[in-house]
């Protein structure tokens, strides 16, 4: 059965038909995966997100599935991930706040088990995977709907877990369920970029109207968040999409007249709006460029990130091969400027790194960073083998892969690597790879094995 046939069945049978108890759990998990402001539980001094607790149930079910079928499907790159975790264990004592290191290590283990569990349950058949993919898309419809409501409420001066205001009491900077707009942008771009690629590729895991509505609502809330990360991501995808259409047209390949007309209309409209604002209302450009140190504005945003990056680099150069543990970067940065470590003072100081890749180096050393990047390489390159095997699945996997790569690049400006939504995305990608290339792997003795 092809991905197109499964998508067709979904359209005819309805979006929610055939859901299992695990599917409902995954729907709740994915819908709340970005929750950092609400739905938290403190257990033994450690904060657990609601979706993490539910994920433990899914991991348990996956274990039962492995026992029932008498086999475990090992995801691509899982060996490298385990090696990375092993390196993290070695460096657990290298922090003035070891409890925090242990907590972060637990998150790392839970993230790894999440990948393994999702592959066990949804990587065994195309039907299961497509069901999970539809749930994933609908989760973005839910979160972007709440984000839109958050913005509308802000116009009335009502705060719905709003953390920042562009205009106090008038314009809420959308953060959804996350802690800040830039983190909402990181989360939202995962879905937005994937859906853009699927739509352009002619693949629709859901009815066309549903995925179009989700895409437009995601784009709208990302723009209204006023996060420069979101704007940069949308602009990049827009330029690539328009460039692709232009390339097809100039190379003599078939392009629908409506597609070409709409592409030209959108491009001219956007350029006209930007030109008008830049020429007649330049103060608007200056307003949104605050903190970047351009157009005569201050550079407080750039300076803060630069100082954090320099501090992290200094921590790395002290001993490049010896890490400080998954949760040890912030406490060790704090100790570089203080004689003694005090938990309450550190928490109030909010000392953290500002580049996810530098934090991985500082946490697990250069050797750990290389292993981690090899893991990312292994999950982001197999789609090349899918094009001739199944065009539809190739487009689906390509969308999930490109969105992951772009978001990881955007995380060079911040965001913790152990955010749940990142690892759920990786888990879904891994399940898709399992369904798509297990046949190839069986012949080559990779990348999936059964033990």
Image (spheres, grey):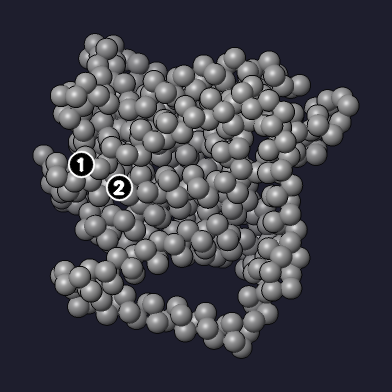
121 or 43: nearer the eye? 121
On-image quarter of the C terminus: top left
* Residue shown at the point (68%, 38%) measured from the top left: 313
* Residue shown at the point (14%, 41%) measured from the top left: 389
Residue 278 location, quadrant: bottom right
Q: CA distance from mark 2 to mark 1?
A: 9 Å
* Residue 320 screen position, x and y as percent: 64, 27
Residue 394 can be seen in this image? yes
Q: Residues within 10 Å of mark 2 (few under 14, many from 20)?
A: many
217 in relation to 404, above or below: below
Residue bearing mark 1: 386
**Total tally of numbered discs in the picture:** 2
Residue 212 location, quadrant: bottom left
- Cβ–Cβ under 8 Å for marks 2 and 1: yes
* Residue 216 screen position, x and y as percent: 39, 64
73 or 92: nearer the eye? 92
* Residue 421 screen position, x and y as percent: 48, 40
Q: Residues within 10 Å of mark 1 (few under 14, many from 20)?
A: some
Residue bearing mark 2: 398
* Residue shown at the point (47%, 27%) measured from the top left: 371
Checking the image for residue 376, the label placed there is none
On-image quarter of the N terminus: top left
* Residue 157 screen position, x and y as percent: 68, 65
71 in relation to 396, above or below: above
- Taking the image as shown, residue 339 lies to the left or right of residue 441, namely right
């Amino acid at each position: 059965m092809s991905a197109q046939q499964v998508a067709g069945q979904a359209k005819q049978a309805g979006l929610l038909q055939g859901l299992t108890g695990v599917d409902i759990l995954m729907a709740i998990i994915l819908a709340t995966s970005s929750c950092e402001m609400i739905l938290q539980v403190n257990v033994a001094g450690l904060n657990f997100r609601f979706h993490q607790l539910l994920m433990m149930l899914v991991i348990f079910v996956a274990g039962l599935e492995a026992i029932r079928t008498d086999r475990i499907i090992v995801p691509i790159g899982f060996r490298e991930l385990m090696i990375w975790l092993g390196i993290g264990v070695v460096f657990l004592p290298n922090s003035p706040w070891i409890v925090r290191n242990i907590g972060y290590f637990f998150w790392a283990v839970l993230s790894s088990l999440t990948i393994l569990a999702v592959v066990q349950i949804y990587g065994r058949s195309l039907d299961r995977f497509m069901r999970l993919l539809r749930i994933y898309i609908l989760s973005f419809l839910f979160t972007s709907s709440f984000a839109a409501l958050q913005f509308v409420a802000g116009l009335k001066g009502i705060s719905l877990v709003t953390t920042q205001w562009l205009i106090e009491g008038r314009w809420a900077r959308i953060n959804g369920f996350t802690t800040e707009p830039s983190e909402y942008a990181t989360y939202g771009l995962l879905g937005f970029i994937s859906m853009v690629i699927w739509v352009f590729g002619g693949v629709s895991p859901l009815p066309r109207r549903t995925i179009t509505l989700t895409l437009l609502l995601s784009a709208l809330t990302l723009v209204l968040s006023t996060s420069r990360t979101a704007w940069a991501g949308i602009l990049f995808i827009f330029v690539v999409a328009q460039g692709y259409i232009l390339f097809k047209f100039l190379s003599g390949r078939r392009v629908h007249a409506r597609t070409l007309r709409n592409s030209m209309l959108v491009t001219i409209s956007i350029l006209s709006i930007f030109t008008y604002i830049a020429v007649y209302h330049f103060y608007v450009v200056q307003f949104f460029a605050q903190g970047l140190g351009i157009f005569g504005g201050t550079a407080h945003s750039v300076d803060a990130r630069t100082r954090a990056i320099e501090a992290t680099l200094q921590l790395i150069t002290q001993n490049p091969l010896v890490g400080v543990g998954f949760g040890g970067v912030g406490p060790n940065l704090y100790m570089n400027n203080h004689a003694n470590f005090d938990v309450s003072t550190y928490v109030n100081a909010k000392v953290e790194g500002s580049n996810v890749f530098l934090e991985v180096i500082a946490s697990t050393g250069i050797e750990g960073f290389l292993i981690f990047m090899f893991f990312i390489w292994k999950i982001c390159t197999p789609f090349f083998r899918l094009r001739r095997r199944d065009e539809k699945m190739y487009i689906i996997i390509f969308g999930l892969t490109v969105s992951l790569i772009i978001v990881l690049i955007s995380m060079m400006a911040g965001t913790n690597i152990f955010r749940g939504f990142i690892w759920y995305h990786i888990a879904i990608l891994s399940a898709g790879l399992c369904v798509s290339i297990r046949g190839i792997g069986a012949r080559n003795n990779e990348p999936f094995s059964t033990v």
